[in-house]
Amino acid sequence: MLYAVKGNTQLKIDEAERADYLKLGYDIAEVDGDKLATVETSPAKTVPYAEHKKALDEIEELKTQLADAKKSTKKEA
């Protein structure tokens, strides 16, 4: 059994309705034990630019730290 999940709304759907609910912004989930596990996320979801920029800045900082760590490891060896 599949579920279309959006916010706190959970609708039981069949496989034929899956694409329609994805287009409407719902995630698709299925029962995993006693919980719903998301199997497909709606393509309509987006990340706010501020969060995206923050993630990119963090990635650059981590790359710099990694490069510095590799340099210091080579100097010690």
Image (cartoon, grey):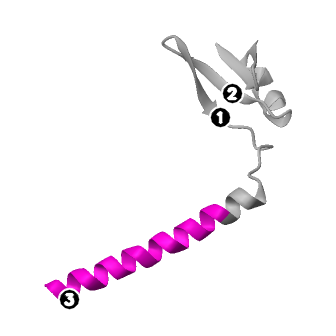
What residue type is disc 2 on? Ile
* Nearest to viewer (mark 2 / mark 3): 3
Instruction: Determine which residue is flagged by label 3.
Output: 75
* Marked residue nearer the N-terminal end (1 or 3): 1
Residue contact between numbered discs 2 and 1, judged by CB atoms under 8 Å: yes
- Alpha carbon distance from label 2 to label 1: 5 Å
Which residue lies at the image location 29% right of the left edge and 85% below the top edge? 71
Q: Tell me: residue 16, above or below residue 64.
A: above
Q: Identify the element where label 1 is drawn.
A: strand
Q: Is mark 3 on a helix, strand or loop?
A: helix
Q: Residue at x 70, y 18 (%)?
A: 3
Q: How crowded is mark 3: few (under 14 residues within 10 Å), some or many (20 or more)?
A: few
Overall secondary structure of the magenta section = helix
**Any mark on residue 28, and which?**
2
**Label 2 secondary element:** strand
Q: Which of 13 and 47 is in front in this view?
A: 47
